[in-house]
Image (spheres, rainbow, N blue to C red):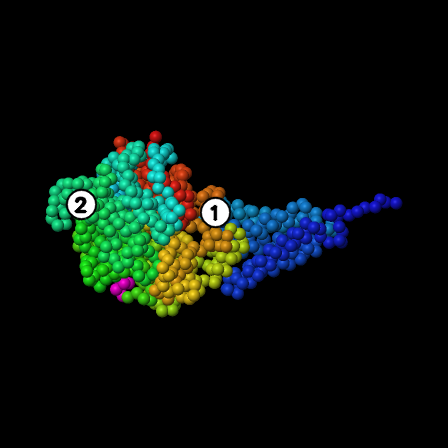
Amino acid sequence: MPAHHSPSSHDQGAAGAGAWARITALICLLLGLVTGFAGAWLTMLGGSPYYLITGIALVVNAVLLWRGHRFAYPLYALILVATMIWALCEVGFNFWPLAPRGDILVPFGLWLLAPWVVRSFPVARRPLRAPLAGAIVASLVVVGIALATTNDDISGSLPTKIVGTFPDTDTTTVPDEDWRAYGRTGAGDHFSPLTQITPENVNKLKVAWTFRTGDMKGPNDSHETTDEVTPLKVGDTVYLCSPHQKVFALDAATGKQKWMFDPKVDSDPTFQHLTCRGVSYHATPAGAKTSDGAPAPLECQARIFLPTNDGRMFALDAATGKVCAGFGQNGVIDLKDGMTVKHKGFYEGTSPPVVTKQMVIMAGAVIDNYSTNEPSGVIRGFDVYTGKLVWAWDSGALDENALPSATHHYTASSPNSWSISAVDEKLGLVYLPMGGAATDIWGGNRTPTMERYISSLVALDVNTGKRVWSYQTVHHDLWDMDLPSQPSLLDLHTPKGVIPAIYAPAKDGNIFVLDRRTGKLIVDAPEKPVPQGPAPGDRLSPTQPFSKLTFQPKDKLTDANMWGATMFDQLACRIMFKQMRYEGPFTPPSTQGTLVFPGDVGMFEWGGIAVDPRRQIAIANPIVFPFVSKLIPRGPNNPAAPNGAHPAGSEIGVQPMYGLPFGVDLHPFLSPLGFPCMAPPWGYMSGVDLNTNKIVWKHKVGTTRDSVVPLPFKLGMPMLGGTMATAGGVTFLTATMDDYIRAFDVTTGKMLWQARLPAGGQSTPMTYAHNGKQYVVTAAGGHGSFGTKLGDYVIAYTLP
């Protein structure tokens, strides 16, 4: 008589599936229900039906798994194959967009092949594993091909022939070894003629010195505490400022501190910014006179000008750091004079002024989107020696040049110029990149006078402040698409001769190229129709200018461009995308919520571009990152007027816009897990031939090492800060979200060298020479709202 046999858990005959198969079935059912219900939602919104179909298939597959059916595996193989075909049709062999389309389904397929799951099926109904194994192998092959395929980048070589010279602006009398203004000269080209560091030796750079400012974010400081400084170098001294506007003078060879000045900025969390992008320098020439014709004072033969975030401007002796007592009131000017709104932190000097032979020309940042009653965006010219107000240009006034008096104040909430300006002293013109009015996102209350210069490039007479010309880059701007960075001057060599040109990068990705004498376009920017249908009470321009020199994406976003860490937050991003209003660039703000792409942070920011005037080329680092803009009607939780409290310092989140029918919620377009909803890359280095206006090379730059995913995946990261280029053929960048300084070949864009920074490098590097050695210097202090590591470092690199 045979011995009694008890069936094992994996030898059940007709008893049905075992525990592991049923657990797997429940997981599959959960995947199917979530995917199916969300997919149905997306389908009803007009999105891809893939998720609905896949969800249904997964539910069916779960039933088969529960019943221990051998055809469960072939069905799942079919799901994987269909997913792979769908994914390739949407994004091609592009690894990062492919990843979230399979990062749940493929691992689950591997789980199905696990021995303990397979053994959990009845012996008589063991699954047909070959089709599933084949589907997984095919999926991995697709992934391998995608990893080996270069996508998004453009390869090429910029021209190397020297055809031009430095622009003839009277601002280029800076010795080759110095860096005397924010962009090295007032021409704003961010280019150095130094040649010691080359593509062949840049990988030998070592730290020469490190300076710690000791200036760190305090508990009562703004969320937007940032270190964006580009230092200056004059003679044997480096000058720089820190977030609290402390000024430091350092020995150029050793980085040792010579002196420090503390303006004792009275900051608090309501400040929208706490930053200092730089200081300005002026040396008294022989025989100089004040604007009144008197001999220039003997004190402070070289001066450092410092604007502060609490609305003051100081003149300091460059040799000692002491205030120049004869300037303003004992060395300081109150920039709030003549304003009707003087609340602390509402008018901020975040960028260095333009300094000419006789004038210091100061613009400033005005708090964004708080109310319709904010400080004026007036631009003023002060005597460089005495601080006397010589002229004013008030972009919101009928009489643009009216000076303040007992009966006249500067126009509240008028458009401001918060970034860095450029100057051509030979032409006698200063070039202002203009921002918006006090409230950016709804403009039904704006008068024609207030609208004239919003998001415009404006040329003023250096000595009188009279407007000479202006060019508007966005009409009735409702997207904060202003001119965010210093324009660059170039004497452009064309078949018709040399044209004095100015290049103005805009947030929307266009670079507008004009004759800097007249404001007439050199590169066409035709007016094109844009989406219509404004928010209640507002209006729209039917067209906007689109420059033919542009970094704007060629195609509109679709739900196929959505991304995320997994298929589920990608699916959530698709649903959010379909719920918003989006019809391409300049889609109007709405209560529904509008996708703003390029986003509010801009394709270009305050870092600007680097221009080699000799080779007639430019290096840029544009970013592509969508934002969401949602108008919030007035109601119980959105009062029409402030209740006495002032906002926390941030340009992200709910902005009250008191005095208008709406507030606005502004934020980056992120998935529920906090990942970008648009597929990478989000940041590039690019090389442009300025004779053809073509992007010759473009390479994504930046990794996730210091972000949510602490691994060095090269996705192409968002950036804040600009590039600096040299005649040695090397360009430098520190602006990415990972903590690196990098060097690239100017001609090809190939990365040549990188080094870790101790904190975020959201600044623009500079270079100088001293005692026969070339140095590259950058600030590494991080950026509060950008989320990079904060610090207080200034680091110089040189060859051994």
Residue 464 occupies which quadrant of the picture?
A: bottom left
State the residue at coordinates (46%, 59%).
Answer: 558
Residue sitting at 52 percent across and 62 percent down? 42
Q: Earlier in the sequence, mark 2 or mark 1?
A: 2
Depicted 340 relative to depicted 11: above or below: below
Measured as percent of width and height from the top left, residue 709 is found at: 49, 46
Q: Position of residue 82 (x, y in %)?
A: 57, 55
* Mark 2: amino acid: Gly
Which label was assigned to residue 117?
none
Q: Is residue 170 magenta?
A: no
Residue at x 55%, y 53% (from the top left corner): 84
Label 2 crowd bin: few (<14), some (14–19), many (20+), radius 10 Å: some
Pick the front one: 756 or 687: 756
- Near mark 1 (Cα within 10 A), the count class, few <14, some 14-19 or many ≥20, is few
Q: Residue furthest bottom?
A: 537
Q: Is residue 453 visible?
A: no
Q: Which residue is mark 2?
A: 326
At horizontal 34% and vertical 34% (from top left) the residue drawn is: 209
What's the magenta region?
448-453
**Residue 5 visible at all:** yes
Label 2: element kind: loop
Displayed quadrant of residue 661: bottom left
Q: List the residue tagged with mark 1.
A: 708
Q: Position of residue 92 (x, y in %)?
A: 49, 52
Q: Amino acid at mark 1?
A: Val
Residue situated furthest top in the rendering: 800
Where in the figure is residue 14, as x and y percent of width and height?
A: 76, 54
Magenta stretch, overall SS: helix
328, 471: nearer the viewer: 328
